Image (tube, rainbow, N blue to C red):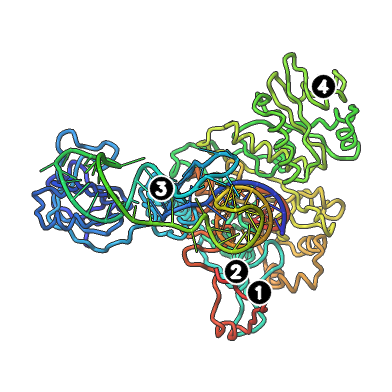
Amino acid sequence: MIRSHTCGELRAENIGQEVTLCGWVDSYRDHGGGLFIDLRDRYGKTQIVFGPESGPENQESARTLRSEFVVAVAGKVAHRPEGTTNPRLATGEIEVHPQRLMILNKSLTPPFQPGAKELPNEDLRLKYRYLDLRRPEQQATMLLRHRIIRGMRAFFDEHDFVDVETPMLGRSTPEGARDYLVPSRIHHGSFYALPQSPQLYKQILMIAGYDRYVQVARCFRDEDLRADRQPEFTQLDMEMSFVDSDDIIGLIDGLVARLAKEVLGQEVKLPLPRMTYDEAMERFGHDAPDLRFGMELVDITDLAKETDFRVFRATADGGGRVRGINVKGAAANYSRKGIDELTNYVMQDFAAKGLAWFKVEEGRTLASPIAKNFSPALLGKIAERTAAQPGDLLLFVADQFEVTCKALYALRKRFGEELKLYDPNTKNFSWIVEFPMFARDEESHCWAAMHHPFTAPRPQDLPLLASDPGKCRAQAYDLVINGSEAGGGTIRIHDPQVQQQVFGLLGIDPAQARERFGFLLDALAYGAPPHGGIALGIDRWVMLFGGLDNIRDCIAFPKTQKATDLMTEAPGPVDPQQLRELGIQIRASEAPSRR
RNA sequence: GGGGGUGUAGCUCAGUUGGUUAGAGCGCUAGCCUGUCACGCUAGAGGCCGAGGGUUCGAGUCCCUUCACCCUCGCCA
């Protein structure tokens, strides 16, 4: 070992010891007679002082040091002179008086300094990711990630889970997201698919009798990126045999409490609250509601039937819904122009036809360009229903249920942030349960699986598969942290009859089922235990636990929104020989552009 | 594929109704300084104003096209 201590380690009790530190030059302050170096590693910073007693040779050498040089310093730990200790530094009581300075490596002038206060643009950070990862904040995030994963692994190990790795090179299944494909050299024209999740393998492991499986699994989905979505991401994937929903939820409750305590130092009261999907959609318009604040959706469809306002009336009579939110005390914050902007937002992004609004005035009267279409009594009822107080802003969307959900959910979320309706440090955990088995696919008018085609219906809903599939609820559950989906799972179908029935509803005929999932159907026929599991989005846990608003900060080497890596410049063109071996020809018009 | 934002010195940004020589702070280079810790002081270097085209006597500024990055809808658990 070159070093005897780290740069975050030395304290007053080390005074007098001979030590060797290694690290990066964080900053240097040359005072002519004496020269101060802050030496940094991932553990902290220690001040090195090249005074006259360190000798002209060392001073000379120290004078050549620049930002991010890598050095080793051997010397004696000394107390800082009276009045020069630095309480902002953990090692601020001491300094090292070097006898020897070794420059282990020089550095070019970095495009940005890891210690700088102002963050450079993200593309620059991504290009020089090794410099960005030197930043203490970024290192703290990677450490947080490590602690979360370590906690998860320990937890599942203590509960008798077996860590089993599943293949990265698998078979494409057209369900779900777009696959990342890997061409086969040996079988020209055939492709592997990178896993979207180890879903089918973990079911097979249950059939194989492993009983409790866990894996920190990399997953790949070739879809467009978002602030909380990367094309490759990491799940804590687990599966158990002989369990029902409550068993999985109860176990994960324990994991949440443990990690909240271990990582955040927060006590979480168990059991975590649960809400049904239907209730979440009614009260918040979304299946992952942010429960840190109120502003719940209010339904006035019944009142809308009594008005002369055509938009409301026609929507209510036509089977749509009229719902709204009360933005408490916000009437003054939003001018006509501000409301126009909100209106454009819901129309542009969520295909809402408009946004109706009322400002609540003294005496709870509702003021609005459309107020004349409402009788005073009706306005009173609306005020009553929305618990309106003077100064409130009421916003309503009249449309199909789904549209009202999306628009009002987005508005609520936006107001929650803009009006700071919650403490950003709060961590709110909850479960959303009893998801529908199926959702209508808008284009094909067929049923589509809400989760995946192996999700089991609730036992009491089995008859509904035949009579009214839309009402059939699944044994599915999502873990929600601060309005973000942090995990989701289901109990799987282990009965081939039920599986066939579900495939039938999804429009997958027996031949197709065999073609796509034959191996799973075969396996299910050889003594499949009842089983179910869950997958937790580790990157999102890190985001939420770390209070970060961006998934890229949680991943050591993330991709940009166009799924490129600015450091390695992946994806890149390949050698024609490689393509020949794979039996692949690129169409001339689509040859890779030089980036 | 649609909507929005950003792009000016190595970095973070300012740049007036279009006006001739494009600025600041940090960083960098050199010098001075024995107690600094975002050290200080002095001097200096550093610009294809993302790229291409257009309007104009004149463009960092206006118009068109395009590229990169970010947010978002669609897409995706």
| Residue labelled with disc 1 | A590
Q: Which mark is residue A194?
A: 2
Element type where label 4 sits in the image:
helix
| First in residue order: circle 2 vs circle 3 | 3
The alpha-carbon separation of the residues under discs 1 and 3 comes to 41 Å
| First in residue order: circle 1 vs circle 2 | 2
The alpha-carbon separation of the residues under discs 4 and 2 comes to 57 Å
The reply to the same-chain question for discs 3 and 4 is yes
Q: Residue at x 15, y 56 (%)?
A: A60
Q: Is residue A445 left or right of residue A361?
A: right
Is any part of residue A198 visible from this angle?
no
The alpha-carbon separation of the residues under discs 3 and 4 comes to 52 Å
Element type where label 2 sits in the image:
loop
| Residue labelled with disc 4 | A379
- Identify which amino acid the numbered label 2 is placed on: Leu
| First in residue order: circle 4 vs circle 2 | 2
| Residue labelled with disc 3 | A137
Mark 4, other Cα within 10 Å: few <14 / some 14–19 / many ≥20? many
Q: Residue A401 appears in which quarter of the rendering?
A: top right
Indicate which label's residue lies in the foreground, 2 or 3.
3
Tell which subunit mark 3 falls on: A
Is any part of residue A86 visible from this angle?
yes
- Identify which amino acid the numbered label 4 is placed on: Leu
* The N terminus of chain A lies in quadrant: bottom left
The alpha-carbon separation of the residues under discs 4 and 1 comes to 60 Å
